[in-house]
Amino acid sequence: MCESRGAAQMELGSSWNAGSVAAVLPAGGSGERLGAARPKQFCALQGRPLVSHTACALERISWISDIIVVVSLEHIETMKSIIQKYGHKRITVVEGGVTRHRSIFNGLKIFAENKLQKPEVVIIHDAVRPFVEEDILLKVVKAAKDHGAAGAIRPLVSTVIASSADGCLDHSLERARYRASEMPQAFLFDIIYQAYHQCNDYDLDYGTECLHLALKYCKTKAKLIEGSPDLWKVTYKRDLYAAESIIKDNLSQQVCIITDMKEDAVQVGFLLHETLKSHIQQVRRISVSLYKDDNYMQNIILGQCFNFICIRVNKSAFQETQQLVDILENANISTLYPVVLILVHLNVSENTSFSSEMEDLTRIKEFAREVKKKNILVYGLLIHYNKDDPQLQETVNSAATIISALIKDRNPELIGQLLVA
């Protein structure tokens, strides 16, 4: 269910055979440092397990043929259910070992034993590093092909010190000379498998650095690639909050404004489109009848937008809104992330009664309650509209601020509420 980018396929796909690159994701950690009831890789971020976010980041890259997720025996069924629920492809679940290195070795064995096609290069990446981008994956893969091994690094944030036996400072390292080893790392498969095959029990039980094994057992010096700040690992509870904040921010960068063909709705849609550009990275506006252009809307939705604003003048437009929900559901978009759907009602009559607005609120609440089961978050927004009103732009500015906040916060407490711009 993750979209296929294929940006790097121009560089890799044309010269590499299918199956040239595979990935192993160790996901057998206990999450002890997180202090949570479940291992961190299975903690939910925006309603989806962390390991699913990471798997999706790799799965959307078409030149990675197979993804091996290594989990402890007790979580194999959990991982299989995640694959089924979120529509993951190209993923094989393997039982892990008692340590990180033993788990990775188990993941590599599936290729060595010819259960899957052996790749030329294998990526090793932590299941709890969800923000890996295609660019850094491409760099480490190409470097591994040239040098045998490669890994992402980052500058040290803190100075590393050594303490003496009595707990006092012994010495410190010159921070400028050292780097933090991160993931992803990539290896020629034969090199890393050979290293693990020769590995002694001490390294398998207490080692953590894969690049070191390639150096120690195969004399392969890894090429070090500067990585981005987003390669950090979810380790503590605060990291979960930070990761969720990044996901929310990424989800809020694209919105689609849908209006009917009526002049009033089109005008407000245009003003909102221009105003939201200062709040949101990508804003698309279309004037369409869903009944007539169902296929066109499906193409828009399949472009993986997770935020929609529906502007309607007619109060009875819930049928078209339901049609949009049906399209979202059929495309399985809301299985990946919560979809925000903001219903904007234009009040073009100056004589609208309070009871009429309450009727709108009741209908929105009922509708929102029903579609929330489908992971679609519905909010209502009322705009009192007069095209000759000199303060119309000010009203639209207020609406844009509310819309931007709803999309970025995804606040469950406001679902089904009718806000007023």
Image (cartoon, grey):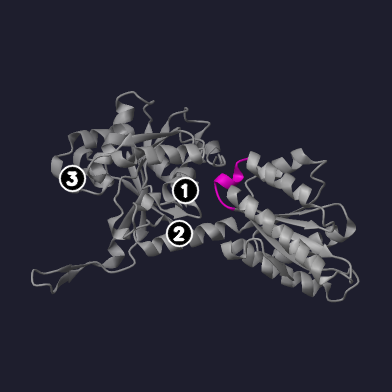
On whether residue 62 falls in the magenta region, the answer is: no
Q: Classify residue 397 by image quadrant.
A: bottom right
Disc 3 from disc 2: Cα separation: 30 Å
Magenta: main secondary structure: loop
Callout 2: SS: helix
Callout 3: SS: helix
Q: Classify residue 340 by image quadrant.
A: bottom right
- Answer with mark 3 or mark 2, whichever residue precedes in sequence: 3
Q: Amino acid at mark 2?
A: Ala
- Answer with mark 3 or mark 1, whichever residue precedes in sequence: 1
Q: Amino acid at mark 1?
A: His
Provide residue 80's location: percent of width, then percent of height: 41, 37
Disc 1 from disc 2: Cα separation: 10 Å
Label annotation for residue 243:
2
| In this view, 68 is above or below 249 | above
Which residue lies under the disc numbered 1? 53
In the image, the segment drawn in magenta is 331-338
- Residue furthest left as drawn: 165
Residue shown at the point (86%, 69%) measured from the top left:
352
In the image, 90: left or right of 25?
right
Q: Amino acid at mark 3?
A: Asp
In the image, 355: left or right of 401?
right
- Answer with mark 1 or mark 2, whichever residue precedes in sequence: 1
Mark 3 vs mark 1, foreground winner is 1
Callout 1: SS: helix
Label annotation for residue 81:
none
Provide residue 339's location: percent of width, then percent of height: 61, 52
